[in-house]
Amino acid sequence: MKRGNYSKEDFLKAVDEYKKGVASAQVTAKYNIPSSTIRNHKSNPTRKIGGGRPTILNKDQEQYLVELLKNLEINGVRLTKSVVRKLASEYAEHVTGKSLELGRKWLLNFLTRWKSELKLIREEKIESGRRNDFTEDVRRGWFEKLGGILRTNNLITKPHAIFNCCESGFSDETSCEWVMVSHGTKHAYEQCGGSAKNFTTSLICGNAAGDILPPFVIYASKNLNPQWTVGGPPGSKFASSESGWITKSLFVQWFKWFVEYTKDVSKPILLLMDNHACRISIEVVEVAKENQILLLLLPPSCTHALQLLHTVTFK
């Protein structure tokens, strides 16, 4: 067995169990510590404890990260290996104060340490393309999950606490082709993949009671021109990015404003969001947890069918 990462606590437990008569192979499998290391420490109690390399996060911090990842899965986040490493790196940087980028080896060792809680499975292929991602199974699964969260948190009769946010981008490419469809077809979608160079984005949020928050407008510019902030709806917030699209840091900025705006709303609050990478960061997740805000992401590539702000309000 290769030299692995294990905590001092696990090592002490392993040695203690081995001293009590548990087979070294069984202890090795349980704690992922080489049997030779365990035997050496039993025969030489004065030997320095902690032969494994110290982990970047201690056991309590890793436990917190495990629970966070499990909650994100429940909330609809697609936890690919790269997403997990990104979130873990953000968390490690937050708790250690050091800039860290955790790699594949860290992830494999992390999964080994927490194999009773987490695992990797290979996704099953479904039809590619946005039009085909919204299947009946996806629709049914989404509403079952949403209904369960509403019932568990007693939100069904609290429309003022159910929020939905979505951005509308005003592209520099505005023309669409006319296409022929059957008489009963209501909508046809062009797959553009966000190819336009510039957007002016407006992030809109409202609740099921019909209340709409002031918009968060993002212009395509390195710097925000003060003249662009004049004449907007009362309470509007403004920012800029090079493309005019929302970024992770801008979403964090908006989310903190959302927390302040909803501070007097009875908790918990449910916030529905599109499944975009910029939505989920350690900072957003922790701020949400501190303020009793439940985050639920729409299934990937289903905004055109399930995002009510997109299908109704922006039409």
Image (cartoon, grey):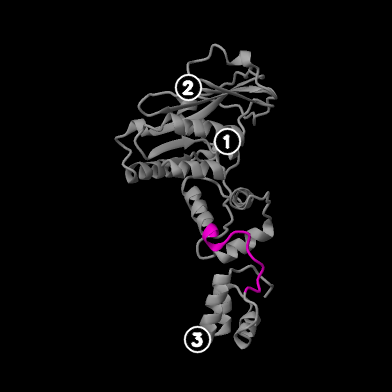
Which quarter of the figure has residue 59? bottom right
Q: Are marks 2 and 3 in contact (CB under 8 Å)?
A: no
Q: Amino acid at mark 3?
A: Lys
* Residue 179 on the magenta span: no
Q: Gap in Å between the C-alphas at discs 3 and 1?
A: 59 Å
Whole-percent x and y of residue 168? 55, 24
Instruction: Say which element carries label 2.
Output: loop
* Residue located 66% across and 70% down the image: 4
Residue for badge 1: 130
Which quarter of the figure has residue 201? top right
Seen as rendered, the residue at the extreme top is: 231
* Residue located 59% across and 21% down the image: 179
Q: Amino acid at mark 1?
A: Arg
Q: Gap in Å between the C-alphas at discs 2 and 3?
A: 65 Å
**Relative to the observer, which residue lies in front, 173 or 231?**
231
N-term mark: 2 or 3: 3
Seen as rendered, the residue at the extreme left is: 157
For residue 133, say whether it is visible.
Answer: yes
Q: Nearer the viewer, mark 2 or mark 1?
A: 2
Whole-percent x and y of residue 139? 44, 40
**Relative to the observer, which residue lies in front, 25 or 291?**
291
**Range of residues picked out in magenta:** 50-62
Q: Gap in Å between the C-alphas at discs 2 and 1?
A: 30 Å
Whole-percent x and y of residue 169? 59, 23
Residue for badge 2: 214
Q: Amino acid at mark 2?
A: Pro
Residue for badge 3: 20
**Relative to the observer, which residue lies in front, 68 or 100?**
100
